[in-house]
Amino acid sequence: ESKTTFSTQIKFVPLTFEFDLPSKIETGQGLQFSLNYFSNFDCELSDLRIKINYPDGFLFKDSSPQALEKTEWEIPFIFQASGGRIRILGEIKGEVGEQKVFRGELGIYKEGEIIVLKEVAQSIQIIEPALYISQMVNNSPDYIANPSDLLHYEIFFKNIGKISFQKKFLLVKLDGEVFDLGTLRSDKGESGPGDNSIIFDWKNVPKLSFLDAGEEGKVEFWIKVKEEDFSQEIKNPVLKDKILISEAEKEFEIKVNSKLVVWQKAYFQEEFFGNSGPLPPRVAETTTYTILWQLENYWNDLSNVKVKAVLPSNVRPTGKIFPEDAKFTFDPASREAIWNIGDVAAYQGIGKVPLTLAFQVALIPDLDQKGKTASLIKEVEAIGQDKFTQDILSSKFPELDTSLPDDETITEQQGIVE
């Protein structure tokens, strides 16, 4: 807190000093107010200080100009017939009916002490909200979105006061880099192409035309989350919407999950290990192949990331992996191969080489596979926790066989077991 002491006070000075505060406010609501000053002195004033004493329950957030210590401002000088304004942003909480008093002092520093030129005090009353605003997104009050999701917003407004509301407009403002504004639509709301706001008119929504005490109304709209947006590195995206109706205002936000993408590919001809054995593969003989796992991550950091797949009973790892320090394990009992990655940074593999693991497997075809392709590896799954949303993300890719769709050097016939 400020340690400036305001001691001496002059009874009358030609100086205007006053708050610009609302008389009433709902508890927990954002409060923006100003303290205005104007000098009628016939000379310049210098070395001024302004100090505000906030009531209990007020949370200071920001000011313009910047405060010295949240409560005090230095004003170098005020010219004759001029003044200024201090704008303060915060939030206030209190009991309904409580009076919150803001006090301000303006003084001039002289010879080691502050001479108070002007004092001001103004109260603001905490009132009961007359409109209660809530929302659901895809039938959930705490929805976490995913890339390419279609979001169904339902905005509820309830009259919890004692008098009716008539002929009101409801405005929704959207703010979020991954909103796909081109997909915004509403049956009863109005918005232009690419707009980030929707206006609901009382002429189209009966409950906005007349809302009696205790009644609740609803408006709704739909919008998609972008599938991807890599034009700039957005990290930890949120989708905000602000609802304004009458004097009530409420802001909501939902988080957006990252997207984890996994691929698996199989090759005979490759640059990692050099495979061997008959091609086409033969019953009871060994042919080696290389399995490639690749991982891509969108805009949030991930933790505890693992990639896993089951190997058929006649396929086993040879022990060759790349990179050699990768945390790769195989459990002979469950036949499960696991790549334990751990943390994966946002934008891993976006616009650059994906996170990659190569490992070699050996296939010994069974007699009943003769004349068919043989399975090399079952469906692969990548899982990890989104550090921003705390959701568990997963991605899957289908199983692979000896047809080797990614190896362009292999013909269809070379994938059939002989």
Image (cartoon, rainbow, N blue to C red):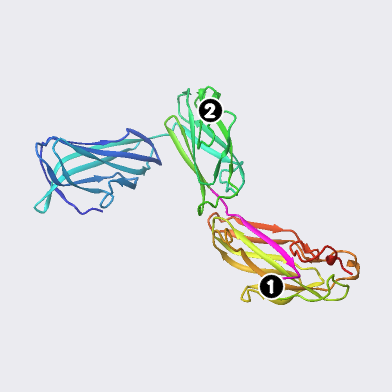
Q: Identify residue for label 2.
A: 215
**What's the residue type where badge 2 is placed?**
Glu
Could you tell me residue 43's position as x and y percent?
9, 39
Q: Nearer the viewer, mark 1 or mark 2?
A: 1
The quadrant in which residue 313 appears is: bottom right
Which element is circle 1 on? loop
Can residue 211 be seen here? The reply is no
414 above or below 387?
below
Q: Is residue 172 magenta?
A: no
Q: Identify residue for label 1.
A: 271
Q: CA distance from mark 1 to mark 2?
A: 70 Å
Between 255 and 7, the one lying in front of the other is 255
Could you tell me residue 243's position as x and y percent?
48, 36
Residue visible at 50% across and 52% down in the picture: 232
How packed mark 1 is, by other alpha carbons closer than 10 Å (few <14, some 14-19, many 20 or more), is: few
Image side of residue 365 versus residue 400, left or right: right
Labels in figure, total = 2
**What's the residue type where badge 1 is placed?**
Glu
Task: Residue lying at the far front in this picture: please name it.
Answer: 409
Q: Quadrant of the C terminus?
A: bottom right
Where are the magenta residues, as a range? 255-271
Image side of residue 366 versus residue 295, left or right: right
78 above or below 383?
above
Image side of residue 156 versus residue 35, left or right: right
First reached walking from the N terminus: tag 1 or tag 2: 2
Image side of residue 415 versus residue 126, left or right: right
Residue visible at 54% across and 52% down in the picture: 230
The quadrant in which residue 354 appears is: bottom right
